[in-house]
Image (spheres, rainbow, N blue to C red):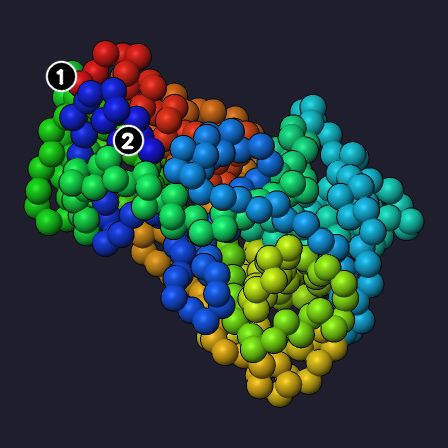
Amino acid sequence: MAARELTHAGKDVCVIEASKRVGGRIMTLYGTSAGTPVELGAEFVHGDAPVTTRLLDEARLVTVPVTGKQYRSDHGELSPQGPIWERMESVFRYLKPDRKKDRSFQDFLDEKPGGAGLRRERELARGFVEGFFAADTRLISEKSLAQADPTDGASEARRVVNGYGALIDYMQRDVARKIRFGSPVTRIVLSETDVRVFDRRGEQYRARAVVIAVPLPILQDESFAIDPEIPMLRNSARQLVMGNVTHVSIVVKERFWEKKARALSYVHSPTRPFNVWWTKHPLLTPVITGWSGGPHALELAEGGDVEGSALKEIARAFGMQKTRIEALVESMHRNDWTRDPNFRGAYSYVGVGGSHAPSMLARAFANRIFLAGEATDSGSSGTVEGALATGKRAARKVLQRGLR
């Protein structure tokens, strides 16, 4: 996004890409028997998402709203969730945005806000924070959740009918010849007149400014050196936490869930390793996706048999025999984002005491280093919108400073 904006403004750019493809944590699988693209990474357009929406319109890519009913599964029995967002809001309204001393969401839950009458709502809220934010409730900041509506963007969502990959294909057209693939950066050297960037292949690039757009762990652990070091950049990054997700899409021979419930979109199982399952309703496609966020996601990945666990959990969620589920499966698809050295996780969230960290990362450093990426967005972290908006922001700051 940053390269595209700068190119349109007439600037010379070079994209130094660590991996062998573009798109980052967008990865769309085409050509399965599903009859529709299968997303291995980002899938939803959350809320209004103005930057994403403008790009989708420009690219003539159609979106479809997520509709349908939400259910909860307990021991194979599906029960309607009713007004699910209102139920969670009955818990979230106890969050305190003006706390002097921040604390974790788990500490908040341990006080049992709302008393015994909201026990199931707290359970639902906990599963939502683990799943939607990919968070460990012991680490995520109460203050960060309180300062914005936690369900904003989740209650209204859309999908790109042709897959998010189609948007990446459209965006890269203007910059395709300017991308250097398979070139992880090892060092950035800053001077008063320019910036030099060195990659693992021994190549050196010189420019007036650099936009750093890497996943959070790469910023945190000094995977690449910055000379001279910028303590504020590293310290701010370390106040955020990279979330973990285990995400499995299953292509089946028939939409078995239609026999269980009408217009089913989500099945919540907040106490189980896979805390939510979803279909592509209103699209009638034979794909169901299992999602695990937070500590459960790591446990599943480290257990070594994610697909087997997914089949066991979907059978439990729908009250079916595992052998019956296995007979219905045509294919299973996932990408291990946590173990991929270029990503090391799914997306970021704010740790205790770090509510100002994203805005700190949004600053210009030494007037020549600019950051982009979902972790640097205060309003839409963890989303495609956050990634795109910050790429546009970084490009705008470069242009405002008159750098070439």
Say which of 52 and 61 sits in front: 61
Mark 1 vs mark 2, CA separation in Å: 24 Å
Q: How far across and how far down the image is residue 293, in percent? A: 57, 56
The circle on residue 4 is: 2
The circle on residue 113 is: none
Q: How far across and how far down the image is residue 127, in percent? A: 68, 54
Determine whether 152 is above or below 280 in the image: above
Determine whether 105 is above or below 3 in the image: below
Residue 91 visible from this viewpoint: no
Residue 219 visible from this viewpoint: yes
Say which of 385 and 370 sits in front: 385
Q: Secondary structure at mark 2?
A: helix
Quarter of the rendering occupied by the N terminus: top left
Q: What number of labels is visible?
A: 2
Quarter of the rendering occupied by the C terminus: top left
Of the two numbered discs 1 and 2 on the same chain, state the one appearing first in sequence.
2
Number of residues whose C-alpha sits closer than 10 Å to that of mark 1, classed few (under 14), some (14–19) or many (20 or more): few
Q: Is residue 316 left or right of residue 248?
A: right
- Tell me the residue at 28%/19% (across/down): 398
- Tell me the residue at 30%/26% (across/down): 5
Of the residues shown, which amino acid type is indicated by label 2? Answer: Arg
Query: In the rendered image, which residue does mark 1 sit on?
Result: 193
Q: How far across and how far down the image is residue 251, in percent? A: 52, 71
Q: Secondary structure at mark 1?
A: loop
Q: How far across and how far down the image is residue 117, in percent? A: 91, 49
Say which of 368 and 403 sits in front: 403
Of the residues shown, which amino acid type is indicated by label 1? Answer: Thr
